[in-house]
Structures are given as structure tokens and as C-alpha cells.
Image: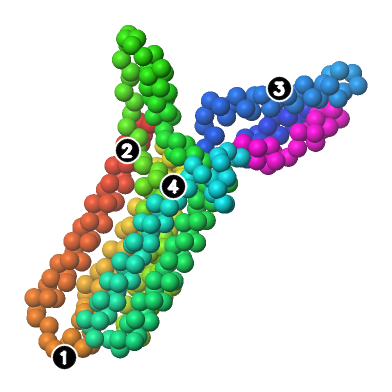
Amino acid sequence: MNENSIEYSVQEYIKEIGKSLPEWLKNTKEHKEILADLEEHLWSKAAELSETGQPDKKSVNLAIDHMGTPQNIAKEYKQRGTPKYYLTQELFPYYKKALGGVFAVIVTLVVIGLIVTFFTGNGSFETLIGGLITGIQTGLLLAFTIVTIIFVALSMEGYFPEDFKSEKEKKLMKQLREQEIEEGVAVSQPLKKPLKPFIKPTGEIIGGGIGLVFGIILLSQPFPTYMFFPDFLMILRVFGLITMLESSLNISRGIIGNRRPKTHQVLHALIIPLKLSVIPLIGILMNRPEIFPIFSEPWIHVGIPVEAYGLYRGILGVIIAITFLTTIENIYNIVKIQKYK
């Protein structure tokens, strides 16, 4: 093996280590320093193991075996934080807040759904109570599972809350800490105001988690379905699938944090068609009000004012307008993030 081949083997090994390092460490100055130190150590170890004192094919392979696989090396950099159950103590407060927020949303949605069912006259009192208990139990179990998986994954990757801040935010915080240390000393130059972070990671993760649970509920429909039209239930399932996909992308954006602007732009571009795909479903509900629970039995026999249909279509029209506005917001964010590259 010639010198170029040895160099290629080393670079490929270092490249694999770089890919295996946790996301919070990538695209940072520390990331480059770690890879440079590992490469220097590898060459030094190869020279030490070589009979001639110069790295060769055999000594390089021995040095790589001695250092271990890229995954094992990267694992050392993921062991941050103080263990607390399967999470880290640093993320545990955010985990509790996320669970509390999601649980509150789940209970609210289930109660609202049962209130609607009660006023439409579908189902006995026992059925409603059973649906309330079943819906809350299923929703809380799904919420607990999804939120826990997300935070355990973040803990295993070694994330800290500050890892979701942008580099400019971290730099500003460092400057402020240094300034606080120099008590009583006037600062000769004012701190440069950094660019405002383009994303709030915690909010995206919690919001995405809530949306994901809501989407799963719409898709799995853990409530009495005999009282709804099949077409309406199918629309709910499609809504649920779209919500799950969009929420998953939002969670991904939250995990990435204020880094990788180009990736954020791509994710925004993927979210836009998902949002627009909701409009045809709303159009179906506008044209077929008879499948919506309020306009089904027994309300038809009671008599529904004509104005109610106009109000119903008006509300759905507002939802369509809001959908268009949120897609415009995504386009605006794509343009805004461009200056962070």
C-alpha cells in the first residue's frame, strides 16, 4: 500500500468518526478540533507500532483496531449529563413540561369530543363515560410513549438545553459571562448584537410532540366510531396522517436547533405541500355538510337553521385562509433563514 492509499484509509476512518459524532457537536469548531486530534493520535500510534518508526499499511490498521470503531469513539462524546432514570438530569425539567403540556391537550381534546357526542345525542351515558376513560387512557399512553422516546433519544445523544441555541447566542452568552467576571471594569467596546435565533427548539419539539399525538389519535380513532359517517372518519384519518408527518418534520427542526440553516429550508419546503394537502379535505367537508356530526342525526329531525350551514362553511373558509397564511409563513422563513447561512 503506497502513501496515498494509507492517507486515504486514515481520512476515510476519520470521516466515519465525524459522521458518527452526535448532532449537537457537528458544525462547530470543537468538532473540527476533535477530528484533528484523533487523526494526529492515529498517525502517532501508527508510527509507534511500526517496526521502521514510520506509518505503514500494517501499523495503520493496527492503530485503527487499537482506537476502536467510529461508533465506539463517538459514544464517548455522547456520555454527557447526569443520569436520571433513562434521561439526563439537564433535560428532565423540559421532559416534565412536555408531558404536562401534551397531557393537558389530550384530556381537553377527549373531553371536547365527548361533549360534541353528548349534544348530538349519540350514545348512552355509560358509553360516554367508557369513551372518556378509554380515550384519556389511550391518549396519555401514546403521549407518554412518544414524548419519552424523543427525550430518551436526545439524552442518549448527549444533548443539553443550550445545544439548541445558535452559535451566535452561545457566543453572546460567553461574552456576557466574561463581562460579569470583570466587575467594576468599564467595557471599552459594546457587545455586538447577534442575529435573532430563527427557531425556538423547545417549542418546536413540544408542539411537534403534541401534534404527533393528536395525529395518532385521529388516525387510530380510540373512541366510539359507530356514531360517525364512514366518509367523515376517513377524512379524520387522512388529517391524522398529514398531522403526523408535519409534526415529525417540526420535531426534526427542533432537534436540529439553530444550526444547519439549509436543512431548515428543506424541511420548510416539505411542510408547505403537506399543509396545502389539507385544503381539498376541507373542501369535501364544505360540500358535504351532511357527513359532519352536527348536521347528522338527530339534529336533522330537530331542524337546523339555514344560517347554520352558512356559518359552518364560513368557519371552514377561515381555516382554509389560515392554512394559506401559514404556508406563506413557511415561505417567509425559507427566505429569512437565508441570511444565517
Residue 141 lies in the magenta-colored region:
no
Amino acid marked by disc 1:
His
Q: Please name the colour scheme applied to the rendered image.
A: rainbow
Tag 1 secondary structure: helix
Magenta stretch: give its range. 56-77
**In the image, residue 226 above or below residue 274:** below
Q: Which residue is mark 1?
A: 301
CA–CA distance between discs 2 and 3? 41 Å
Residue 61 lies in the magenta-colored region:
yes
Q: How many numbered badges does the structure rendering display?
A: 4
Say which quadrant the C terminus sits in.
top left
Q: Which residue is mark 3?
A: 40
Name the side, left or right, on which 1 lies relative to 337.
right
Tag 3 secondary structure: helix
CA–CA distance between discs 4 and 3? 40 Å
Q: Specify the principal SS of the magenta part.
A: helix
Name the side, left or right, on which 186 lies relative to 264.
left
Label 4, residues with CA under 10 Å away: few <14, some 14-19, many ≥20: few
Tag 2 secondary structure: helix
From the top left corner, tell me how far across and down residue 216 is, in percent: 43, 67
Mark in front: 1 vs 2: 1
**Comes first in the chain, label 1 or label 4:** 4
**Comes first in the chain, label 4 or label 3:** 3
CA–CA distance between discs 1 and 2? 53 Å
Q: Which residue is mark 4?
A: 93
Q: Which residue is mark 2?
A: 335
From the top left corner, tell me how far across and down residue 41 is, in percent: 73, 24
CA–CA distance between discs 1 and 4? 52 Å
Tag 4 secondary structure: helix
Mark in front: 4 vs 3: 4
